[in-house]
Image (cartoon, rainbow, N blue to C red):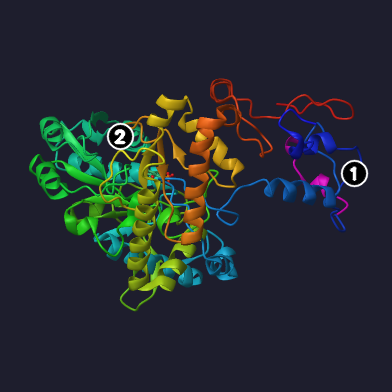
Amino acid sequence: MTAAGDRLGPTLFERSRPGRGGGRIPHPPKDALARIPPDQLRTDGLHLPEVAEPELTRHYVNLSQLNYAVDTGFYPLGSCTMKWNPKVNEWAARLAGFASLHPFAPDELAQGTLALLWELEEALAEIGGMRAVTLQPAAGAQGELTGILMVRAYHRSRGDTERTEVLVPDSAHGTNPATASMAGFKTVSIRSAPDGGVDLAAFRAALGPRTAAVMITNPSTLGLFESRIGELLEAVHSAGALAYMDGANLNAIMGRFKPGEAGFDVMHINVHKTFSTPHGGGGPGAGPVGVGEKLLSFLPSPRVLREADGSFRLERPGERPTSIGRVRSFAGNTGVLVRAYAYIRAQGAAGLREVSGDAVLAANYLMARLAGVLDIPFSRHCMHEFVASAATLKAETGIKTLDVAKRLIDYGFHPPTIYFPLTVEEALLIEPTESESIEVLDAFVAALRAIVAEARTDPDLLHSAPHSSPVRRLDETTAARQPNLRWKAMTGSQRPCPD
Ligand SMILES: *Cc1c(COP(=O)(O)O)cnc(C)c1O
């Protein structure tokens, strides 16, 4: 068996036998090859694995069954909002009118999709208290970049070219400083106050004529609502800077707090977190960006416009010269946007408000039940997630957060986010979401209690966990420093793949 573990089995390349295959092209034209320009013809074999269809199907289905997903169990991955994805969304996203629409279809033939996108923009603008929304960005990170590029365009349009800095709290997601750098700004990291909130004095000291924007995550990545938001926004605006809100944690506040009305100039929304889309493993997602009045004219093009007669069309190239231009091909990840639309329509305003209430309730319940099991560094009312820490456990038993997380896999749970935020030692960021029952939350607490007990009685069991998974502990340092991402060495019947 492969080095990766017994349950993984051989790769398709290892299963390959010359001459086996799954498909046949029916009635291929005799001169098919002659129709292809000679310089486009392949000179060498394809070197793809040769397997029959049942073998291929089983290979992928078996691999899919190794996946842990919200459809298989509790997934309390803080910051990621791994909530239930209603299956009716899948039905909607697969409707042929959406799924099979050609991306170059003329506006007249795309009225349904354009109407949906327009209505979704309106709904998100309402939820965020924003003036308008673009749906183009493919993820939260790209939404951030889009937002900060608009901020840059805004300052430039006013001839204000000295603003070279973006202030970011030290608890922020790594995408915030990455965004600032990609847009050509210098990131200034601002320390958090001891209560986990923004250190207002430190912010005020850093704010000035060089500040282009401040990026705030609210609720923060520590799961705390930023109580000094009014003062902070006032300070930002009086310094002539703009306020960016990282809206990844909208699931905790929707229907209750509208960032645009509070004074934020721009925010992104991770629809795959808040408005339900299966995510994980890198996608797909969408990161719509809402803006207030100041940034309206800089929104990416093309926007979806509604004409006086009620029909819809896309902006034409060059129609709005102040736009920062396109940030993604076509209309964005439309399938994800259809899911978000279906979710919002199914919930309605009251339902969305209930979602945020239940998410916050579930997190506070878990936090209260875990007090005394793990450290709870910020015990004030949390939002939809909270930080726990294994610092005391480590000091007493040598068992660290990583060991606890790996052992949770043996108990059938996906581990929470670990070692993030970076500002808390031995952190676990736990986010239950609104869609889990109290029985599931209690079972998770029972598993963590059992693991903490094992740390005292059988620490070796934890050091070597997980014991039930197809792969055990990975060498993460080597994986990061010498990534080996491609299956190489073919032996026997197969020749190595050409590079
Ligand atoms: C998830 C997340 C992001 C990045 O969003 P992606 O959609 O993963 O690109 C940014 N900030 C915070 C706080 C997040 O949780």
Look at label 2 and name its amino acid. Answer: Ala
Q: Position of residue 417 (x, y in %)?
A: 45, 40
Image quadrant, ligand 1: top left
Label of residue 100 in the image: none
Label of residue 180 in the image: 2
**Residue indicated by mark 1:** 20
Q: Position of residue 298 (x, y in %)?
A: 26, 50
Q: Residue furthest right?
A: 19
Name the residue at 35% across, 67% down.
354
Q: Residue furthest left?
A: 238
How many labels were placed on the picture?
2
- Corner quadrant of residue 343: bottom left
Magenta stretch: give its range.
29-41
Q: SS of the residue at dot 2?
A: helix
**Picture layout, residue 163 above or below residue 337:** above
Q: SS of the residue at dot 1?
A: loop
Look at label 1 and name its amino acid. Answer: Arg
Q: Position of residue 129 (x, y in %)?
A: 24, 61
